[in-house]
């Protein structure tokens, strides 16, 4: 059965500016690993007939230096306001079982380290984006406006291979406290987008 969703997105990862993995998954991360938190706010959508509008999902991954080597460790949080049906459908979408962008990445996942409900708060204030997941994840990123750009427009990547889309805004982590499913790191860089659309 078909599904679709639209929404906004923010992430932070352990690489220095600019994350080599975001330039291409087969580029090595800054360090001997890449650890990343991906936060989704779903504004509208349905999965196999289940309305998932207003739900939030946060993924955390621990990957090798070169992401295409696979054997990722992946954890999934679904907001605790989700019904049982919404929870089950969202886990299938974000776990890659229903195809789409996460389905394309599913062969790289070696272990799902946890799937939980949690209080998830995601907020946007201009260039600032904040994500809090219970007591496990708390970070803030800020979109980067280049020196001398009087319009205030932030830097954007175009033509990326990324599950969210090919055009994302470059950001820098301002605050991070991340320790979830045994994965902990200091976020340094980030990406955001005010709109994304998935369908399968």
Image: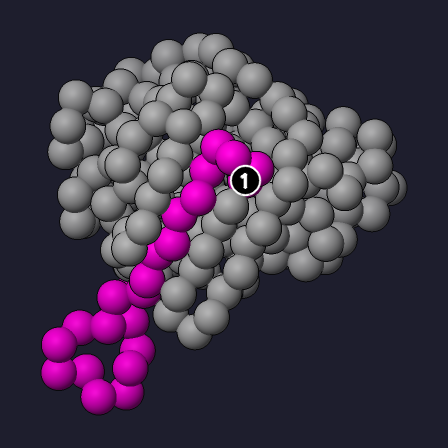
133 sits left or right of 61 in the view: right
Q: Position of residue 100 (x, y in %)?
A: 59, 36
The figure's colour scheme reads one colour
Does the magenta run of residues contain 148? yes
Does the magenta run of residues contain 175? no
Q: Quadrant of the C terminus?
A: top right
| Quarter where residue 29 is shown | top left
15 sits left or right of 128 in the view: left
Magenta segment's dominant SS is: loop
Q: Position of residue 9 (x, y in %)?
A: 49, 53
| Quarter where residue 177 is shown | top left
- How busy is the neighbourhood of tag 1: few (under 14 within 10 Å), some, or many (20 plus)? many
16 sits left or right of 70 in the view: left
Provide the secondary structure element on which disc 1 rests. Answer: strand
Q: Residue at x 32, y 62 (%)?
A: 142
Q: Position of residue 15 (x, y in %)?
A: 21, 38
Q: Residue at x 22, y 88 (%)?
A: 150
Q: Relative to the observer, which residue lies in front, 20 or 173? A: 173
Magenta region: 133-158
Q: Residue at x 15, y 28 (%)?
A: 31
> Residue 161, can we see it?
no
Q: Relative to the observer, which residue lies in front, 159 or 176? A: 176
Q: Residue at x 23, y 23 (%)?
A: 33
Q: Quadrant of the N terminus?
A: top right
Q: Residue furthest bottom?
A: 150
> Residue 44, can we see it?
yes
Figure label count: 1
Q: Position of residue 191 (x, y in %)?
A: 35, 53
| Quarter where residue 65 is shown | top left
């Amino acid at each position: 059965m078909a599904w679709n969703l639209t929404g906004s997105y923010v992430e932070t990862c352990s690489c220095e500016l600019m994350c080599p993995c975001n330039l291409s998954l087969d580029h090595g991360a800054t360090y001997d690993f890449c650890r990343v938190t991906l936060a989704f706010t779903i504004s509208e959508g349905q999965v196999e007939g289940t309305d998932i509008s207003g739900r939030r999902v946060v993924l955390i991954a621990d990957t090798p230096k070169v992401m295409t080597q696979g054997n990722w460790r992946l954890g999934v949080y679904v907001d605790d306001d989700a019904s049982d049906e919404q929870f089950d459908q969202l886990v299938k979408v974000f776990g890659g079982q229903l195809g789409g962008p996460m389905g394309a990445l599913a062969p790289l996942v070696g272990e799902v380290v946890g799937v939980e409900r949690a209080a998830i708060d995601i907020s946007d204030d201009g260039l600032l984006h904040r994500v809090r997941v219970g007591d496990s994840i708390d970070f803030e990123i800020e979109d980067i406006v280049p020196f001398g750009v009087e319009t205030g427009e932030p830097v954007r990547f175009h033509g990326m291979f990324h599950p969210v889309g090919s055009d994302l805004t470059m950001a820098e982590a301002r605050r991070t406290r991340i320790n979830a499913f045994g994965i902990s790191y200091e976020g340094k860089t980030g990406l955001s987008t005010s709109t994304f659309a998935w369908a399968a």
